[in-house]
Image: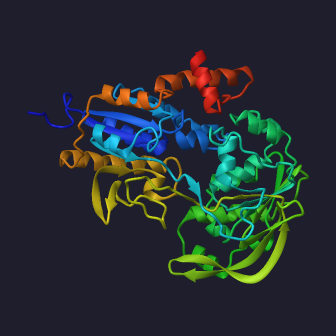
């Protein structure tokens, strides 16, 4: 007779797909529980930590220190990491069902949203996510090219990713050289001709999605003055009334930060960062070379739209001369074969992390992070989110609402993965890579110097 699931002689076997914060927080809660559990984490990239390694800006080293928590989780004897292994290519969902009682997808929001305007696909028009991945040394983007001979750049969006892009474009070479920015990006930005950066927001300062610390940092750049048109910093009557009745001090401070920027005098720094509000891009206009040379903006007014405030075009337009455009207007998840998907929201439908099909739970399938809730929140948001999902998983163990795998020997799965993907990267391998990167950084006074391509990573492991 088989013993109860979750005991030492019959441990719960869990696969987590994705090694960013969302995945690690699920693993942490499971491994801290009273249930005997073995967690295998898979990532299509050779290195762990997802958004922290490839999404957090290189000049925000303090935020990256959360990887110390993940490192402790990964060193639990009941945890294994399989890097450079892609579900759907190297291992299928059916394979996972054969080997695990539960599978949790923490794959994030991997694609950017389009603006849907003429000229969006012109040369020198890019997704902000591509630029962020490039300067952070993401293996899939290390060969990207961005024309930094452009003097005027527009970043469409006023969320934290847009702020990161604008800030990195405005940093001095000396500031960037003190970070873990990828070497190829450091060299390109060192030779950048960018002199003016515009951030473009459809709504007003009050509705901007950036957080106050991120916004405040824009006013403290050593190499760039900041400017906000006074009329765009002022609140429209709708927003002013809403703020008057609000008890949210965070929003009040956000508005104050923006209005402080509007009152500043230029100090003669080499670059100028301009924040624009209440304008929407309606077209990217090509120059003689076929690439972006200008962006048409339409002036907006804000109108009440149910419980939210929405922008409405006035028909009044202007052409802003820009040579390079990065759009940061939202992100969405991508479907996973064999699981339901909500096309409009770009998430896997779920109830507290349990994947649902027509509101009925799909046995043994779970989600955490942006693929669960959409691209909202900061890194810390994933802790509460991951705990909620892990709690649902443990409840389902108690209720015996789990998969019934035919192959529960960990060695069988390990052999399968290595047969399908001989260049698998274990956590022990990552520890060696980490040591190499830190050592390279120490030699030149930087936090680390990243290995950025799969070939470079495999060569480092082969020589180690």
On the image, the x and y values in percent for residue 402 come to: 23, 46
Residue 322 lies in quadrant: bottom right
Query: Count of labels shown?
Result: 0
Question: Which one is in front, 114 or 414?
Answer: 414
As displayed, is residue 143 above or below residue 272? Answer: above
Q: Quadrant of the C terminus?
A: top right
For image coordinates 32% across by 25% down, the residue present is: 411
Q: Is residue 16 left or right of residue 433?
A: left
Question: Which one is in front, 217 or 364?
Answer: 364
For image coordinates 57% across by 82% down, the residue present is: 304
Q: Residue farthest to the front?
A: 419
Q: Residue farthest to the left?
A: 1
On the image, the x and y values in percent for residue 70 come to: 47, 34
Q: Residue farthest to the top?
A: 464
As displayed, is residue 280 above or below residue 238? Answer: above
Residue 330 lies in quadrant: bottom right
As displayed, is residue 14 above or below residue 197? Answer: above
Regarding residue 142, the answer to whether it shows in the image is: yes
On the image, the x and y values in percent for residue 454 come to: 60, 32
Q: Is residue 35 left or right of residue 349?
A: left
Q: Is residue 265 left or right of residue 241?
A: right
For image coordinates 43% across by 64% down, the residue present is: 342
Q: Is residue 163 left or right of residue 124?
A: left
On the image, the x and y values in percent for residue 355 come to: 34, 56
Question: Which one is in front, 418 or 183?
Answer: 418
């Amino acid at each position: 007779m088989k013993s109860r699931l979750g005991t030492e002689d019959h441990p719960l076997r869990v696969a987590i797909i994705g090694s960013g914060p969302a995945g690690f927080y699920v693993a942490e809660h499971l491994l801290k529980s009273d249930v005997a559990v073995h967690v295998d984490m898979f990532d299509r990239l050779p290195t762990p930590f997802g958004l922290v390694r490839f999404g957090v800006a290189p000049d925000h080293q303090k935020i990256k220190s959360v990887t110390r928590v993940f490192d402790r989780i990964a060193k639990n004897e009941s945890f294994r990491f399989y890097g450079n292994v892609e579900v759907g290519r190297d291992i299928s969902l059916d394979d996972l069902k054969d080997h695990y009682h539960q599978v949790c997808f923490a794959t994030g929001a991997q694609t950017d949203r389009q603006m849907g305007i003429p000229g969006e696909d012109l040369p020198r028009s890019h997704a902000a996510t591509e630029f962020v991945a490039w300067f952070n040394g993401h293996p899939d983007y290390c060969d990207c090219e961005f024309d930094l001979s452009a003097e005027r750049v527009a970043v469409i969006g006023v969320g934290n990713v847009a702020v990161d892009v604008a800030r990195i474009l405005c940093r001095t070479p000396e500031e960037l050289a003190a970070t873990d920015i990828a070497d190829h990006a450091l060299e390109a930005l060192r030779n950048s001709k960018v002199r003016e950066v515009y951030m473009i927001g459809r709504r007003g300062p009050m509705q901007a999605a950036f957080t106050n610390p991120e916004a405040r940092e824009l006013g403290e750049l050593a190499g760039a003055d900041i400017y906000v048109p006074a009329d765009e910093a002022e609140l429209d009557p709708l927003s002013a009334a809403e703020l008057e009745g609000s008890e949210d001090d965070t929003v009040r401070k956000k508005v104050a930060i923006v209005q402080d920027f509007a009152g500043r005098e230029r100090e003669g720094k080499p670059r100028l960062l301009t924040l624009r509000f209440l304008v929407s891009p309606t077209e990217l206009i090509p120059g003689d070379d076929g690439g972006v040379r200008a962006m048409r903006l339409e002036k907006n007014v804000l109108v009440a739209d149910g419980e939210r405030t929405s922008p409405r075009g006035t028909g009044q337009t202007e052409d802003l001369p820009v040579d390079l455009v990065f759009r940061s207007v939202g992100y969405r998840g991508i479907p996973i074969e064999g699981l339901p998907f909500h096309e409009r929201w770009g998430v896997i439908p779920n109830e507290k992390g349990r994947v649902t099909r027509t509101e009925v739970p799909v046995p043994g399938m779970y989600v955490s992070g942006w693929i669960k809730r959409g691209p909202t929140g900061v890194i810390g948001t994933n802790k509460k989110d991951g705990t909620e999902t892990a709690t649902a998983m443990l409840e389902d163990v108690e209720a015996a609402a789990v998969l019934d795998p035919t192959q529960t020997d960990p060695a069988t799965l390990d052999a399968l993965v290595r047969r399908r993907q001989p260049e698998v990267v274990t956590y022990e391998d990552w520890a060696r890579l980490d040591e190499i990167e830190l050592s390279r950084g120490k030699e030149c006074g930087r936090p680390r110097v990243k290995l950025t391509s799969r070939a470079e990573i495999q060569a480092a492991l082969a020589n180690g």
